[in-house]
Amino acid sequence: MLRSLVTALLLCASACANAPIDAESDPNAGLLRDFLDGKFDAAGHPLNAKVLDAATLCGGTALFASCELALPDGARSGPLMANLRLRVHDHASHGAIVTLRLGTASETLTVARLRALEEWIDLPVTLQSGSATALRIEPASSAQIDIDYVEVFPARFGLVIDPGSGVVDRLTFEIPRQHKLQALTADGVDLMPRLDDLLASGLATRTTTELRTLIDVGVADLVPARGDVTELRARAGDDNARAQLRRTAAACAFEGDPFGTRVLVTGFQPFPAAGTHENVSGVAVTAMNPANLRNAQVMRLVLPVEYDRAAAAIADVIERCAPDIVISFGQGGGAIALEEVAYNLQDTGEISGGAPDNRGVIRAAQPIDAAAPAERPTLLPLAEIESALVAIGEAPQHSTDPGRYICNNVMFVNIATMGPRGGRAGFIHLPFTTQFDDAVRARFARVVETAIQATVDTP
């Protein structure tokens, strides 16, 4: 899967990286802060990018007609990535807004793919091979847009583990052509010697193309002595990826009152894939004690940070285990955020080029379900949850923006799956933290327990 070189840039760059989080206005501010990795200049551009001032070269920030930008020397042969920074003020009710052309490649921002008006966003296009001397920006006649700049830089494949987490028989590691797989572990055990033996014996295969290397291997061959759940981690160059391998689907293991309401609670693994600290949601869900609840039995599940795979895991558990309530938790910004709505969109426009999930996949302005509505409101009793959390000394806030990363993806799907069953489902972000002493674990375990109890107690 093609990934951009730019996988870790906050749009506000270094200035925002050091700014305090304004939890009063946005409890999820800083949601993707862990992706800022220092590989960018002070203005926020990739260190090897050629930056074109589109506003100056096209005669102003407001673009009313097509504009062609000559590419600088050193940025004319593929594979190339060009990224246009733009803002949409208005557009027709449907169809194209603007098209970006680079040689034989093109990318169109459509109304269906637009996240919001009046917000700066990115439109990337990739030229996989060949050459280009110019980049052309073509706005639709009905569109009112502003442009800022275009970045042009070498595109490349990033490390991807396919198909990702779950019950899988085979794995494919997709690696940039200029790199090699440098590290591979399962639950901390080095798998590189075993993989080398499998390649030498023909039980694993390596295929190299102009742009990438594919290594295909059976899971049972690679990790024969694995447990029920195995944490697989890989590294190639600066890229990291991880996946959660399961022998079987998660068991329907509910704890607590056997006659109580059945509640599924979920948290997440650490992210990014190279994350060095735990995820507060995974910590909270693991630390909570079902025995502290009344009239409730709880199944706990820690999800992989993967777009479709995390959502599919929840949908599978709902189908097999039939919970009455689903409450998903994630790592957020500066406050507890009670999410009011999920959006039918996968996008990390806050970061130039997009942020990869833990198996290496980037989604930019893509719907979760093309046949589904644009939004789905929460099915949780947020007012009652808020009152209960305030009663234990917390200061939750309501949020209408859960981001468009994995948390939003999970929320959109858990509501869609539970709604037709007459159940309750939704999402709560917990405050970002990197410190997890006993007091912190106890605090967030209590937050989870309180949210569950308030939901169970609400008719």
Image (spheres, rainbow, N blue to C red):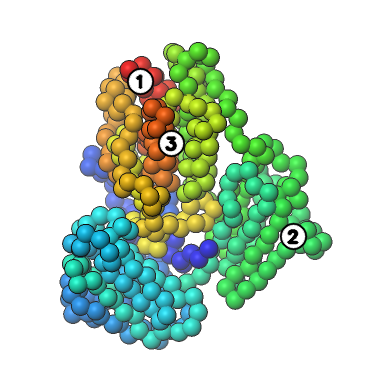
Whether residue 339 appears in this view of the structure is: yes
Q: Residues within 10 Å of mark 2 (few under 14, many from 20)?
A: some
Q: Earlier in the sequence, mark 1 or mark 3?
A: 3
Q: Position of residue 316 (x, y in %)?
A: 53, 37
In the foreground, 89 or 360: 89
Q: Position of residue 5 (x, y in %)?
A: 46, 67
Residue at figure coordinates x 50%, y 66% from the top left: 2
Residue under numbered circle 2: 204
Amino acid on which the number 2 mark rests in the picture: Ala
Whether residue 238 appears in this view of the structure is: no
In the foreground, 19 or 332: 332
Any mark on residue 417, and which? 3
Amino acid on which the number 1 mark rests in the picture: Ala
Any mark on residue 454, and which? 1
Q: Earlier in the sequence, mark 1 or mark 2?
A: 2
Secondary structure under tag 3 reads: helix
